[in-house]
Amino acid sequence: MLDKFQDPQGDAVDVLNEYKEEIPAFYRNMLLIRKFEEQCGRLYMEQKIKGFLHLYIGEEAIATGAISALRDDDYIITHYRDHGHALARGLDAGAVMAELMGKATGCSGGKGGSMHLFDVSKGFMGGHAIVGAHLPIAVGLAFAIKQQKKDSAVLCFFGDGAVNQGEFHEAMNLSAVWNLPVLFVLENNLYGMGSHVSRTHAAGPDMYKIAESYNMGTLQVDGMDVIDVRHHVDKALEHLRKGEGPLFLEAKTYRFRGHSMADPSAYRDSSEVVEWQTKDPIDNLAKLAIQYNIFEESDLEKIDKEVQESVDDAIAFADGSDEPDMTELYNNIYENI
Ligand SMILES: Cc1ncc(C[n+]2csc(CCOP(=O)(O)OP(=O)(O)O)c2C)c(N)n1
Ligand SMILES: [Mg+2]
């Protein structure tokens, strides 16, 4: 297991040992995302959550590994599959659930919903529904950091679909030209809605290579392995904080569920899903932790119970909250247009 962790110079690194202390937190956070979203799926079927709902199930290791590496003064900006990133950043699960249910106590006041989670106090700059549109905003945030002569960083998450958008190329180019502290994190889950990347992306399966044409350093990680993600994001952040310019990280992953709740997933073979489920980031971390005596079975049961309780509390909080007042319709909008 440890042999696969090689640093770029080829020296074997005992990465597991390096992150040993953090494994319980990684496990807890991934399980929180998983259980939270399983309940979201149920609440959507009960029509307590309305609108669009895109689940992150299967991809939890990326948000957990990457965001755990950040400091409080760093920024995160992400796409519409954003529940995992928000929970990993420590947004309150009750406030996130309330947002999904359109309640006034939601993190965006109940007016954003699933795709527009936001919390400026945590440097969590959304939740964006338009594919690729948040990449230039990531560049703007990084530009502000540089102008203020700070050593903060921006983590910008997006899917393989965004790579084919014009904004992607604008953002890559300007961030490289201006040497900005942004880590572009491609969550390559092989599909954009029902289209496999082989049908939409001309440059081949290793999508990170596209960044080389912008003279940008690249990393490729196993997006199903939280330790691999964290290890490489740590290295990337060191580079960014020294002012050495943007980097591009491709995390290979897979969404276990459909694109959204409305997707019967008819475009992919169930054997492919089953194959990827053997790489489940949560199950595999549990096995690793047991194997290396970091956990006993009873620890897993305890964490499971605690996480379930916090999800239940989040649902109860959201359920018991009021909808926004009608006057809210007139707040946070441009007037006189
Ligand atoms: C500009 C734009 N075009 C189309 C859509 C419709 N749309 C929503 S999600 C999506 C697929 C994006 O796939 P990807 O970037 O790979 O992210 P994933 O859903 O796989 O996480 C599309 C085409 C959109 N939201 N914005
Ligand atoms: Mg995708």
Image (cartoon, rainbow, N blue to C red):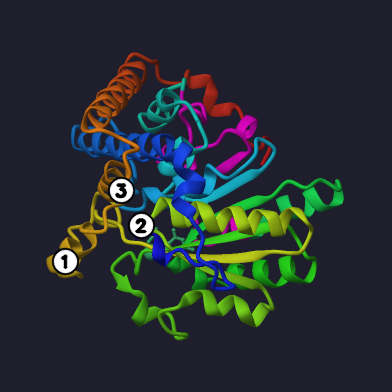
Residues in magenta, as a range? 106-135
Left or right of 156, for residue 300:
left
Could you say which is closer to the camera, residue 332 or residue 9? Answer: 9
**Which residue is located at x 33 percent, y 42 percent?**
51
Left or right of 168, for residue 323:
left
Mark nearer the N terminus (3 vs 1): 1
Q: Quadrant of residue 205?
A: bottom left
Tag count: 3
| Quadrant including the N terminus | bottom left
Left or right of 135, for residue 283:
left
**Which residue is located at x 24 percent, y 62 percent?**
276
| Quadrant including the C terminus | top right
- Badge 3: residue crowd in 10 Å (few <14, some 14–19, many ≥20): some
Badge 3 marks a residue whose secondary structure is helix
Do the CB atoms of the residues marked 2 and 1 lie less than 8 Å apart? no
Left or right of 3, for residue 335:
right
Reading the image, the residue beneath label 3 is 288
Q: Indicate the amino acid at tag 1.
A: Ala
Q: Name the front one of labels 2 and 3.
A: 3
Reading the image, the residue beneath label 2 is 224
